[in-house]
Image (tube, rainbow, N blue to C red):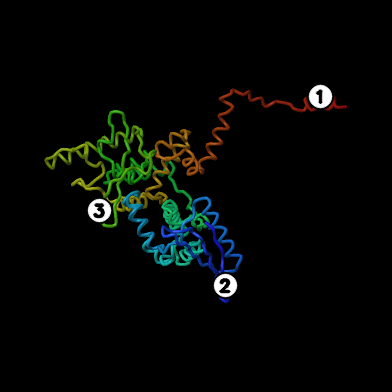
Amino acid sequence: MRGHIRQRNKKSGTWSIVLELGKDTADKRKQQWITVRGSKRDAEKRLAEVLYQSDVGIYVAPGKTTVADYLERWLVDYAKPNLSPRGFERYADIIKRHLIPAMGTIQLSRLKPEHLQRHYSDVLASGLSAASAAYHHRVLHIALATAVKWGLVARNVADAVTPPRDRRPEMQTWDEYELNIFLEAAKGRQYYALFYTALFTGMRRSELLALRWQDIDFIYGQINVSRSLHQLRDNSFVFTAPKSAKSRRTIALPPSAFLVLEAYRKAKEVEYSMMGTTLNDSELVFCNLDGSPWRPNTITRAWSMLAARAGVKPIRLHDARHTHASLMLKQGIHPKIVQERLGHASISMTLDTYSHVAPGLQDAAAKSFDDVVKVSRNKDIDFTKELDTKLVENM
C-alpha cells in the first residue's frame, strides 16, 4: 500500500489521505480516502500510521458501523453465549442505558480515548460512583477487545484511558465474640442453618442457594460446590456453573456445621413426611416448602435485620465469607487452604484480599521462627568484647 496527502479545505484545515490499494479485477485503480482535520503534520502522521499498520498486517479500513450498531451486535454474538445470564443482564443494562446514549452515534472506527474519558467524567458528574464508571470501562474494554479480534478496529482505544479509581470500602468482619452473638440470636429462626453454613464455610450466597442435598457428603463431612443460583430481572431463577475452575471445589465441614446441617435435614424430613412425601437428594437444601428457591434479596434483608436485632456491628451477608477467611488466617491456617475453601483463582488473590490480617501473621511467624530453629535466647550476650578486640587489632 502506498499513499499521499492533499489539502481539501485550507480554511477549515481539512486534509485527505489518499491510499493506493492496487487494481481491481477490471484493472482499475482502487483508492481509499481518509479525512484528517488539523495541520499538514497531523495528516502526515496519520498517513505514516496507516502505512505502518498495513505493513504489519493490522490495518482495518474505516467503516460506517456506529458504536451503537457494534455494541448491539456484540451483545448478541459474544456476550449472550459467553456470559452468565445475570452477567449478560448487567452488561446489556450498562450498554443500553449508558454507553449507547453517550457515544452510540460515533463511528466505531472514529472512537477515540477522549470520548471514553469524557463519558467517565459525565458519569461522575451525574452522581454515579467511581465504581460505576470503572464498570462501564470494563464493559467497553472487553467489547472493544472483541472488535479488534474481529478485525473491525486496529486497536482498543480503552487501553489508552484510565478510568476513575474505585475506592473500595474497608472490609468489615466479625470477631469470634460477634459471630457467636449473631448465631445465638439466629437460633430457631428460618435461616439459621444457612447463615451458620455461610459463616463456617465461606461459601457465596449464590452457591449456598444452589446447594442440593446430594452435594453434602454426610459420611465424610464435606460440601461439593458445583453451581450457583441467580435471580434475573423477570424474577426467574437460573443455575449456572461456578465463576471459575477453582470455584468448583470441595469444602470440609467443621464438626459444628456438620451437626447443624444434619439436624436441619432431619427437620426437613419430618416436614416432608407430614406432607405425605419424602425428601429427595436432588432437591435444594435451602428452599421453600414447595421446593422453590429462596429469593437472594430476601436472604440478604433477613441477615441485616437479624444483625441489627442481635446488636452486633452491621456487615453484609457477603462479609460472612470475609469473616470466615479472616478468622482462619488469624488462627494460623495456611493461606493456600483458605484459598481452596473460598474458591479464589489464585493464592495471590487471597493474600491481597486479606492483607489486613497480614500484620498479625507476620508477628506470629517472627515469634515462632526461633522455636523452629531452636535458637538460644541468651540475654547476656556482650558485643563490647568483640569491639574491644577489633580496636586493639587496628591500633
Q: Separation of disc 1 and disc 3 at Cα?
A: 84 Å
Is 40 in front, or is 163?
40
Circle 3 — which element?
loop
Q: Separation of disc 2 and disc 3 at Cα?
A: 57 Å
Which is more N-terminal, label 3 or label 2? 2
Quadrant of the rendered structure where residue 340 is? top left
Residue that extends furthest to the bottom in the rendered view of this protein = 11
The residue that mark 1 highlights is 389
Residue 305: x and y, percent? 34, 53
| Residue at left offset 39%, top offset 64% | 100
Residue 374 - label = none
| Residue at left offset 29%, top offset 45% | 209
* Relative height, residue 260 to residue 129 (above, below): above
- What amino acid does circle 3 point to? Ser
The residue that mark 2 highlights is 13
Circle 1 — which element?
helix
Q: Nearer the viewer, mark 2 or mark 3?
A: 2
Quadrant of the rendered structure where residue 365 is? top right
Q: Are marks 2 and 3 in contact (CB under 8 Å)?
A: no
Q: Is residue 283 left or right of residue 355?
A: left
The residue that mark 3 highlights is 236
Which is more N-terminal, label 2 or label 1? 2
* Relative height, residue 68 to residue 275 (above, below): below
Q: Is residue 375 left or right of residue 244?
A: right
- What amino acid does circle 2 point to? Gly
